[in-house]
Image (tube, grey):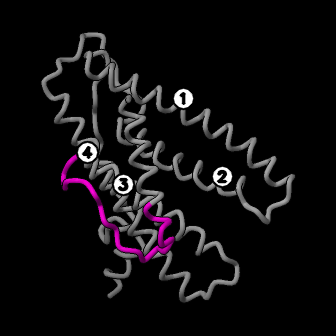
Amino acid sequence: MSFSEYCTAIFNQSISNYHVEDDVDAKIVNPFTAGSIDFLLYQKNWIDTVQWHLEDIIRNPAINPAEALIIKRRIDQSNQERTDMVEYIDSYFLEKYKTVIPEATASINTESPAWAIDRLSILALKIFHMQAEVNRPDAAITHKAACTAKLAILLEQQKDLSAAIDALLEDIAAGKKYMKVYRQMKMYNDPSLNPVLYQQQTAG
C-alpha cells in the first residue's frame, strides 16, 4: 500500500466513524496513538468532515441569523485548526527527511506534502457524499446518472492526486525535491492583523 492509499484508508475510516452519529457536535475518538502520523491524518480528516457539515448547515436559507453567526465562528475556528493540522503533518515530513541532502538541481514543489494531503482528505469527503447521492433511494434516475458521472471524475482525480503525492515523497526522499514550509498566518483570527479588530481596539 502506498502512502497516499494509506492516507485515504484513514480518511475513509474517519468519515465512516463520523457518520455513525452524523452530528457536528459528536465527540472525536481518535483510535491512533497521539502524535503519530496516523493520529494526525485521522484528526485532520475529522476536522474536515465536521466542517463539511457545518458548511451544509450555514447554507440553509432558512437558518436563524443568530445560529448562522455561531456556525460562522465555528467554521473560522475549524479553518484555523485545519491549518494547524497541516503544519503538524508537514513537521512530520520535515523530521522524516531531515537527513536527506538535496541534489544541486533539486527543486521546490508548488505545495508541501501536507497541503496536497489536505486536498486528498477533502477529495475523500467529496467521493463519500457523491456516492451517497448515487445511492439515494428517493433520487431521480437523471440525478443518479449525473452523480455517477461526477463520481467517476472524482475517482480519477483521487487516483491522479495520489500518484502525484507518492511521486513527490519519493522525490523528496531521493533529494530530487526539497521541502520548504511556510507557517501560515490566518490573519482574520489575529487581533493585530485583522483591521476590523485592531481598529476597534484603537477606537476604544
Q: Mark 3 points at which residue?
A: 44
Query: Which numbered mark, 3 or 2, is in the foreground of this view?
Result: 2
- Above or below, comparing residue 179 to residue 13 in the picture: above
What is the x, y in percent for residue 189?
Answer: 36, 68
Which image quarter: residue 166?
A: top left
Residue displayed at 70% across by 55% down: 135
Q: Which of marks 4 and 1 is nearer the N terminus?
A: 4
Question: CB of mark 2 within 8 Å of CB of mark 1?
Answer: no
Residue 49 on the magenta span = no
Task: Between residue 159 and residue 77, name the one nearer to us.
Answer: 159
The range drawn in magenta is 17-36
Identify residue for label 1.
160
Q: Find residue 2 and report its horizontal and vertical position in percent.
A: 38, 29
| Label 4–label 2 contact, CB within 8 A | no
In the image, is residue 53 above or below residue 180?
Answer: below
Residue 111 lies, in percent from the top left, at 40, 35
Specify the quadrant of the image occupied by residue 165: top left
The reply to whether the C-beta atoms of the residues labelled 4 and 1 are less than 8 Å apart is: no
**Vertical placement of residue 116 versus 12, above or below:** above
User: Mark 2 is on which residue type?
Assistant: Met
Q: Residue at x 35, y 35 (%)?
A: 113
Residue 130 disc label? 2
Which residue is at 60% across, 69% downward? 56
Quadrant including the C terminus: bottom left
Residue 37: give its label: 4
Quadrant showing the N terminus: top left
- The residue located at (17%, 21%) in the rendering is 100
Q: How far apart are marks 3 and 4 (CA)?
A: 10 Å
159 up-or-down from 187: above or below? above
Of the residues shown, which amino acid type is indicated by label 4? Ile
Residue placed most toward the observer, 81 or 181: 81
Amino acid type, residue under disc 1 in the picture = Asp
